[in-house]
Amino acid sequence: MASKEGWLEEEDVDDDDDVCLGDDDAWEEEDVPAQPARCLFCREEKPSAEEIFSHCVLHHSFDIHQMSHDWSLDCFGYIKMINYIRAKNPTPASLKRTSPTTEPPWAADMYMQPVDPEDTLLQFDIEDLDESSFPAPPVAMATKTTGVSHPTHTMNGGDVPLVAMETSDLVSLTTNQYEALLQRLKSAEERSKQSEENLQRALEDMDSIREKTRELVLSQPSEECPSASRISDGQTDIEDDDDPYFSSYGHFSIHEEMLKDRVRTESYRDCMYKNKDVFRDKIVLDVGCGTGILSMFAAQAGAQHVYAVDMAEIIYQAMDIARENNLEDKITFIRGKLEDITLPVGKVDIIISEWMGYFLLFESMLDSVLYARNKYLKPGGVVYPDRCNISVAAISDLDLHNKHVTYWDDVYGFKMNCMKTCVVREASVDVINKDKLATTACIVKELDVCTCSVGDLQFTAPFNISVTKETSISAFIGYFDIFFHQNCTEKVEFSTGPGATPTHWKQSVFLLDTPMQCHTGDEIKGTLSCRKNRRDPRSLIITFSFNGKTLTYYME
């Protein structure tokens, strides 16, 4: 056995000599992997549970082996006791005062819940211990004064001098006891090593069973297992992401709203069905597939194969939907973040995605589409939609302004003017009637999705809009237009602006603090900046600067 720092080598001492044990030292065993464990009563750490047990005996007069014996603990009782001590921090003395004839304080099932899931002591099998492994009861502490007679305690049939010195915090044992202690620890470490090997084999067996089960489920026909649509290897066990963005898309109502948006859905369908020569025999990637509607459009338009990626749990319904429509052999579903997964193919011919959010860029899903384009799109490949733009205009809608701003002047007889600033600074979405438009529109950003970069998605741009009637301007609005043009013989496009058929995106509304009186022909010149919120990169901060004013809005 390798020597322990602070211990004397066995051959360097006589049988009658004392051997010093340093409580801050750690065992070293070359063939046993380290399993650090933390003391139950102090911050001391040791390489194994057995060494912590010895530490507790020597420094806290707490013998966990004896406690287990006295209380007749099985593995569950032992686990509860460890978790109770971790949770309640009792003193060793208070634990020893409990009587085995009463119900232990750790009897409640709540103590099966680990305080620390990585607690090494919870991995120790207390049932491996036997009576012979119990150490002697804790010894009385000697005075710290040097040169006095030390108390003795009977251990293994003999009187043993025991010394605890406050100045050095050392305990003396005879060589025989030292050897016995080493033997006990070595035996415990061997059992620990064997348990580790058994656990590893069990985990390997579980992985094998999981893989066999997955293969069996995926091989079943649809009428026997309708939920077992095709999914790529290694993607079925992903835990839900804690990002609220992905969680929100697990709600069916969102997908129902998007599917019922005929402008949105039929534009994608028309792009593919009216340009089948573009999709025929192509490998297609659908980024953020949702229910898989775009993937199925692509498959029926003649795509050779479609790879559909989504992080939200809706992908499991998408698998069932594809199976219901006999398209499971044409579509491979992959659950995961686009940036984290690896496609089964090196390159694709076409990327389709419905990535647009309010004010076009809200939710930042375009970032993932551009990542997919840079990594997977073949030279000459295309992303649909391939172009888009953002426009701004101003409206006169005093009813809308009163509803959200003036309302705070009198709330059940109370003034709440301090709420105005908070409300005004929050951008909202609403359907604006084209009759409320009070100015011309101005395009502030154009994007070619096939060539733009992530840096283009944060920008500052000038705008110049002309007032078209005598009125009071109450808000700016923003909207976007979408184009499916590249390589298409029949081009498709749609707008989310006032006057167009309403979509679920509606228009983004930026209320003014106070309506601004304007005359026909007046020009409102300024700049608009759009940037991501550092606290939440999926939200936007939009700033209008005009006529010496600067108004900042948050889209969250």
Image: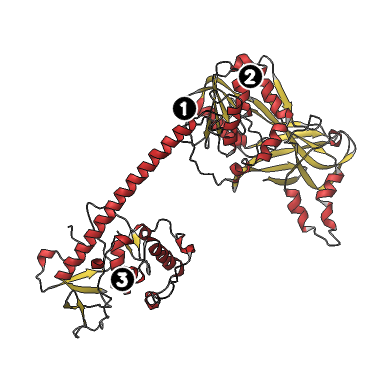
Measured as percent of width and height from the top left, residue 289 is found at 59, 32
Q: Position of residue 521 (x, y in %)?
A: 86, 33
Q: Amino acid at mark 1?
A: Pro
- Rounded to the nearest angstrom, the CA distance separating label 3 from label 2 is 79 Å
The quarter of the picture where residue 480 lies is top right
Q: Earlier in the sequence, mark 1 or mark 2?
A: 1
Residue furthest right in the image:
470
Question: CA separation, marks 3 and 1?
Answer: 58 Å
- For badge 3, the amino acid type reads Gln
Q: Tell me which label, 3 or 1, sits earlier in the chain.
A: 3
Other residues around mark 2 within 10 Å, as few (<14) / some (14–19) / many (≥20) = some
Give 9 or 471, whichever is nearer the viewer: 9
Left or right of 438 on screen, residue 155: left
User: Circle 2 — which element?
Assistant: loop
- The residue wearing badge 1 is 344
Q: Residue furthest bottom?
A: 148
